[in-house]
Image (tube, rainbow, N blue to C red):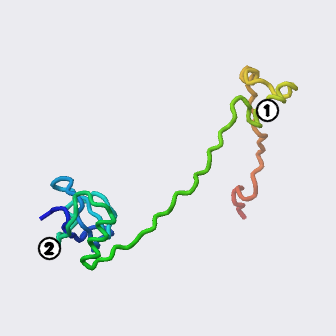
């Protein structure tokens, strides 16, 4: 019952209820369908076969499928795919030229205002800050309640 030219109706997925024609039988479980559906390979389980058949060659073009379906009173919607626009060119960095930040650091290094990384690593560690002076006076909120 599954043969090239058989009309089928899709029962599963978002295109359920649309009619197509079997253009090619891939194997026991997959078929290529065209018509009101996107032309691609589908699982046979997603379709119900109809009694009607159309005379088509294996792997027929979309135009031949549309012409055959119009003979059975089925109109195939015409889709106008988007035309590919020009892709933007990728701008690459020039080799050998340092980035602006690197230029600035190089200029400061020449002046001697920026220490080299090795000098920073060898520098003695900073002493920890002395703890804050503590007083015995407690803030009013934390003070024990007065007894009268």
Q: Residue 73 in the image: x percent, y percent?
A: 27, 79
Which of the two residues, 107 or 115, is positioned nearer the viewer here? 107
Residue at which label 2 appears: 51
Work out whether 135 lies above or below 67. Answer: above
Q: Residue 12 in the image: x percent, y percent?
A: 26, 68
Crowding at mark 2 (Cα within 10 Å: few <14, some 14-19, many 20+) = few
CA distance for labels 2 and 1? 78 Å
The label shown at residue 70 is none
Secondary structure beneath label 2:
strand
Q: Is residue 27 left or right of residue 113?
A: left
Q: Quadrant of residue 101?
A: top right
Q: Is residue 108 left or right of residue 37?
A: right
Q: Is residue 28 left or right of residue 40?
A: left
Which of the two residues, 33 or 70, is positioned nearer the viewer here? 70
The number of numbered discs placed on residues in the rendered structure image is: 2
Q: Quadrant of the N terminus?
A: bottom left
Residue at left offset 26%, top offset 76%: 71
Q: Quadrant of the C terminus?
A: bottom right
Q: Is residue 103 left or right of residue 34?
A: right
Please identify the residue farthest to the bottom as the structure is shown: 73
* Dot 2 and dot 1 residues touching (CB under 8 Å): no
Q: Quadrant of residue 102?
A: top right
Residue at which label 1 appears: 103
Residue at left offset 31%, top offset 61%: 61
Please identify the residue farthest to the right as the structure is shown: 111
């Amino acid at each position: 019952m599954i043969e090239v030219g058989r009309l089928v109706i899709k029962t599963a997925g978002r295109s359920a209820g649309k009619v197509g024609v079997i253009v090619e039988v891939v194997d026991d479980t997959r078929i290529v369908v065209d018509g009101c559906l996107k032309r691609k390979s589908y699982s046979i389980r997603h379709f119900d076969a109809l009694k009607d058949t159309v005379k088509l060659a294996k792997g027929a073009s979309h135009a031949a499928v549309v012409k055959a379906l119009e003979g059975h009173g089925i109109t195939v919607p015409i889709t106008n795919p988007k035309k590919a626009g020009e892709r933007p060119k990728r701008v690459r960095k020039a080799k050998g030229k340092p980035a602006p930040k690197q230029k600035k650091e190089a200029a400061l290094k020449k002046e001697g205002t920026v220490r080299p990384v090795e000098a920073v690593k060898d520098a003695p560690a900073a002493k920890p800050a002395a703890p804050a002076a503590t007083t015995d006076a407690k803030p009013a909120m934390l003070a024990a309640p007065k007894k009268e």
